[in-house]
Structures are given as structure tokens and as C-alpha cells.
Amino acid sequence: MATRGNFSGRVGFILTAAGSAVGLGNIWKFPYLAGQNGGAVFLFIYLFCIFLLCYPVMVGEISIGRHAGLDAYGSYNKLGGPRWGYLGLFGITVGVFILSFYNVVAGWAFGYFLHISFGDLLSETDYSSFFGFFVNDILDLTSAEGLANSNFIFSAVFMAMTALIVGRGIQKGIEAANKIMMPILYLILICIIVYALTLPNAMSGVRYYLIPDLGELKIQTLFEGLKQAFFSLSLGMGTLMTYGSYLKKNENIPSSVAVISIADTSVAFLAGLMVFPLVHFLQYKLQVTEVATAGPPLIFIVLPQIFHEMGPLLGKVIGGLFFLLVCFAALTSTISLLEVPVAYLVDQKKMRRRVVSWGLALLIFVLGLPVMASQGMVPALNKLAFYKGQDYLVFISDMCDISLTVGGCLMCIFVVRQWKLKNMNEELSLGNPGYNASFLKKYLNFTIQYVCPVLLGILSIMIIIDKFFGIERVF
Ligand code: PFF
């Protein structure tokens, strides 16, 4: 066991787990979901999901991992037998698929970073066509321009950086990388917010973001909030279980989880506070009442246009910093995603970490090829007939979202029926002597036993119905 490695201490663990949580989900997804779903109403629902459902699930996952001291499969298998082991394998598979599409989007961000900082992206005039052209170019060897835009290369480099870090092990690779990237990430975020708030019309963006619009309250807002909270906190598939297995016994899990949740939520919140003043600045500049911020193009179409408006020098600095921020956020998450199957092969098959890191990275990169091709190059993947004509990227990301909430629900059932709350409580009282007499214990036991499995079960079923049939049509 001594060779598995562990985190050096509380700070290392918290920064690394927060690094997994803080990612594209916070910076790319959260602002536009909040914008589409009534601003502060969404924020409120999101916080509600974190407090009631995500916090207990995260505590449960980490305590299972630390108690078993193994990867996701090994932990379920050790504490619950081979049947529960399948739940671990399910989580590992979901992680592999998340990484397959996540790395492609991270590659886009990496490409934009290079193009803004070292190229002439800011001299473009039509960012919408540029994005269409960019995501469509998988590997064009016929011209220098084509090659410079090739997603294949950006994604491959991003995956290689991930493999390099994971291959170096827990303390020297994963923890060290997070300890560097996370503080820089916060610093960049704060600097851009401060700058954005000084721009003309910024306050209108803040109002749009923070004043609740109750008219937007729909059942889908709840679904979106829940899915986003699970994805954002990296729950439901064993990432935090795996990280928990490297945590020392004298660390206080509930308080670490509180810090991780706050760190993640604050980045999501701050990302909105960065993006909306920028968007409203653009509206002011263009003298329009609304620019389309719906959907993923927000950061790849609208924001570059804003950096363009800032002028060549300032645009390069702020735009370059912004995409560096996105790359750091993505990299700290891809590391955690790759660690899940790597830990499985290292623990269960006794393979060498460096070898499996590179081998799995290659495999997952190949799984990402259809994601790249789905952005226009292959029409059948661009409009999936069985999925309302949506593309493969949307499909795979939706399936993973659903799997996370289902995985979280099953984890709670595992704790209650198989592992038993008594054992979880014992694990949680290590490093937290007052735990057994605390209100927190009652809260966690009640939520893991009743609230989380029931609500996550019902909501998962409703989300599946909504995705495939549309909830309004069914009810
Ligand atoms: N939490 C990451 C984000 O918000 O971008 C995504 C993620 C990472 C999901 C790791 C799941 C996971 F296991």
C-alpha cells in the first residue's frame, strides 16, 4: 500500500479536490445556464442542491474512498462485494466518457489561448463564422492556417499534459500541479472581474445576473441546477472517492468538503460576475439591447468579440488571461478525470502508473475523435436522428450528466444498505473527535438515508424523461 502515494496534508487535498471541481463547468457552463434560467433564481436553486444533496454525497464518497484506500471499483468491491463493484466500474466508464468530450472542449480553449496570445484572432471580424470554421477543422495538413487551427493537435497536447501530470503520481504530479494552478486561477479571475466592473454598462450586467426573475422558474430550472451542481462538484462517478483514498486518516472530511464546496461555488459565482459585465459592455458598444449568450458559444463567440472591442493590446492581455484561466481550470479537472481509471489499473491490475497514464490518455483521446467530428464534419454525428437532431457532443454530455445523478443516488443506497451509516460515522469521526455528538452527524445521516436517495432517484427519472420525451408532453 505504501506505493499508492498520498496527499501531503489538508491544503494539498483541498486544493486538488477543488481543482477537480473547478473546471469548464464553472466558467463555461455556469454563466450561460444562469443567464438562461433566470439569473439569481438559478443561483438559489443551485445553492439549494449543493447544500441538501451534493454536500452529503461528497462526504459519503470521500469517506468510502478513504476507508477502503482503493480506486472506485476496489472500494465498492472491498466494502460491498463484486455486485457493488459494478457500480465502481460504471463510474470509471462514465469518467472515461466525460474526459473524452471534456478534453475536446479544453482543446478549443487551449487553441483560443494560443490564437489570442500569439496569433491574430483579435483581428477577426466575424467570430461566429470563425468558431464554426475552427471546430470543424479536425486535422488540416494542406495549409499552414489549417494546421494552426487543427483541433486534433490542441486536444492531443492537452491530453498529453494531463497524462504527464497524472503519470508523475499523487504528490509530485497531481498535487503539485494543483498547488500552482489553483492560486493563479483565482488571481486571474479576480483581476478580470475588477477590470470588467470598471467598463461602461457593467452594472447593468450585474443587475441582470443578480436580480431574480421569477418568471423563469420552471421545472427544468431545477433539473439544470441539479445536473450542474453534480457535474461541477465532480460527484457521482468516483473521482472524489479516488482522491479520498489518498487522504490521511487524521484529516477532517466534513470540514474539507465544506471548503471544497465553497471554493467551487465561489468560482462559479465569480465567473458570472466576470462574464455578464463583459457581455453588457458589448451591448453598449454595439448599441444593441441584447447579444445572444445562449449556449456554449458564449465563451467562444461572444467573449472574443468583446476582447476585440477592447483594442489590440488590452484585448490580447485580458483575452489571453481569460483563456489561460479556462485552460488551468480545465487541466485541474482533466487530471482528476484521468486519475479515476488510472487508479483502477494501478490498484487492481498492478500496472505501472506512468504506462497506464499514457495508454489511457491515448485511448480516451481516440474516443474524443467522434466528438470532434460531430461539430459539422460528419453529418450523421452532427444531427443524431434518435436524439432530436442534436449532435454527439450534446448527447454524450447529457448521458454523462444523467449517469452522475444516478451514480450519486446509488452511492447513498450503498452507504445505507451495504456499508452502513455506523461505519461511515466511524470513518468521519477520525480527525473530527466531536463529530459523534454533533448536529452535523444527524444532518448527514438523515440526508444520506432519506433525502438524497429519494430526491436523486426521482429527479434522475424525471431528467431522463425530459431528455428523451420532453417533460411537458408527458405530464
Ligand atoms: N467538475 C468539473 C467541472 O466543473 O468542469 C468537471 C468534472 C471533473 C466532472 C471531474 C466530473 C469529474 F469527475
Image (spheres, helix red, strand yellow):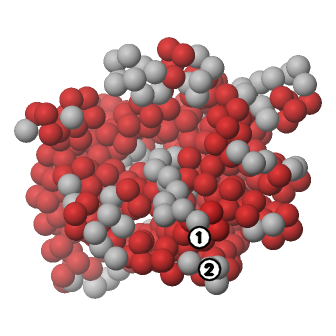
- On screen, residue 392 above or below 130: above
Residue 374 falls left or right of residue 306:
left
Q: CA distance from mark 2 to mark 1?
A: 7 Å
Amino acid under disc 1: Tyr
Relative side of 205 to 48, left or right: right
Would you name the residue on which mark 2 appears?
Answer: 200
Q: Can you give x and y, in whole percent of width and height, for residue 244 in the image? A: 46, 58
Of all residues shown, which one is farthest toward the right? 144
* Total number of numbered discs in the rendering: 2
Front residue of 433/401: it is 401
Rendering quarter of residue 313: bottom right
- Return the residue nearer the eye: 352 or 396: 396
- Residue drawn at x 67%, y 28% is 136
User: Which image quadrant for residue 131?
Assistant: top right
**Residue 226 higher or lower than 153, as above or below:** below
Q: Which residue is located at x 51 percent, y 19 percent? A: 381
Label located before the other in sequence (2 or 1): 2
Residue 296 visible within the image: yes
Q: As rendered, which of 389 and 440 lies closer to the eye?
A: 389
Residue 231 % position (x, y): 41, 51
Rendered location of residue 447, percent (x, y): 17, 64
> Would residue 59 be visible to someone looking at this image?
no
Find disc 1 in the rendering and name its residue: 284
Give yes or no for contact between labels 2 and 1 (Cβ–Cβ under 8 Å). Answer: yes
Residue drawn 13% across and 34% down? 473
Is label 2 within 8 A of ligand 1 (CB to nearest ligand atom)?
no
Whole-percent x and y of residue 80? 26, 41
- Mark 1 is surrounded, within 10 Å at the Cα level, by few (under 14), some (14 to 19) or many (20 or more) other residues, namely some
Q: Is residue 97 above or below residue 61?
A: above
User: Quick one: 125 or 444, which is closer to the camera?
Assistant: 125
Query: Which image quadrant: the C terminus?
Result: top left
Label 2 environment density (alpha carbons within 10 Å; few <14, some 14–19, many ≥20): some
